[in-house]
Amino acid sequence: MISVIITTYNWPVALNLCVRSLFNQTDKDFEIIIADDGSKKDTEQLVIELKKVSNINIKYVWQEDLGFRKTAILNKAIQITDGEYIIFLDGDCVTQPDFIEKHRALRRAKAMVTGSRILLNNSLSKQLCSDTNWDFNSIKKKSLLYRIFGRMNKFMPLWIKLPSSPLRNYKVFIWRRIKGCNMAAWKSDIQNIQGFSEDINGWGHEDADFVFRLHLSGVMRRSGSWCTEVLHLYHSETNKSKDKLNAGIVKKRMLELKTK
């Protein structure tokens, strides 16, 4: 079975859309774990309501709001997963109906997958969030127009899905194109590196650190582009005050490990 961990913080409208898009998956053999980094009670209430209408098992884990602590809540969520393979998804991302199916097709032993995203503008994001019934086919049919008028930054990956092949395999560690909002790995490989590094707090680069440490442990990175794209809802810019500090932590760790 696959476990999908969704991180969220005080945006229940987006989380609702994210989870409901998972209800429409072609592959139903998965569970959902909502990892809440300190949201108010309305998020927990939403989860209660979603559980009532879901045929997919939904679990919920919450931690006190002490600032951006995504790594800590992810590690808590990992502990309660039942799946042997884990997909990481952000609560401001909406999935295509074959999202689980494509991730399952890309998985390989001792390998992880890093996917990509399609950015939506503010007006399209508000439009989708205002409609509780997720209709992917409607979005797909209008995607060319959305691209022409700047409502999404790309549309072709919604129409063209490239198959699994050795061309997806990264030969060396590359920092670029790592998106923590859409990536997957085997639970045993994640446990082998003790999960996410909780010395990285605040926004930025916890995903690069995670991928780098998996790489060092012998796990190969595979690209999920043109196969697993998620639709990323627009939101105001996150506080990035820890960006340089976190990048420095990762770079220092990389340097230390390379010189050993």
Image (cartoon, rainbow, N blue to C red):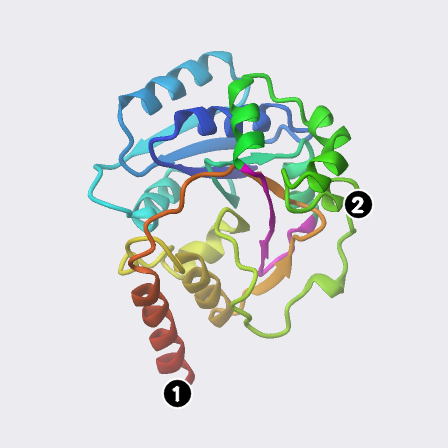
The label on residue 2 is none
Residue on which disc 1 sits: 259
Residue ID at (79%, 45%): 160
Specify which label sits upstream in the sequence, 1 or 2.
2
Dot 1 surroundings within 10 Å: few (below 14), some, or many (20 or more)?
few
Residue ID at (20%, 43%): 66
113 falls in the magenta region: yes
Residue ID at (45%, 17%): 51
- Amino acid type shown at disc 2: Ile
User: Quick check: 66 above or below 165?
Assistant: above
| Figure quadrant of the N terminus | top right
User: Quick check: 157 above or below 12?
Assistant: below
Q: Which is more toward the observer, 198 or 151?
A: 151
Image location (x, y in percent) of residue 45: 34, 17
The local secondary structure at tag 1 comes to loop
Dot 2 surroundings within 10 Å: few (below 14), some, or many (20 or more)?
few
The span picked out in magenta is: 106-121
Image location (x, y in percent) of residue 88: 49, 45
- Residue occupying the far front of the picture: 149
Residue ID at (56%, 18%): 131
Q: Which is more toward the observer, 221 or 227?
A: 227
Image location (x, y in percent) of residue 5: 46, 39
Q: Disc 1 or disc 2, which is closer to the eye?
A: 2
Residue on which disc 2 sits: 160
- Amino acid type shown at disc 1: Thr
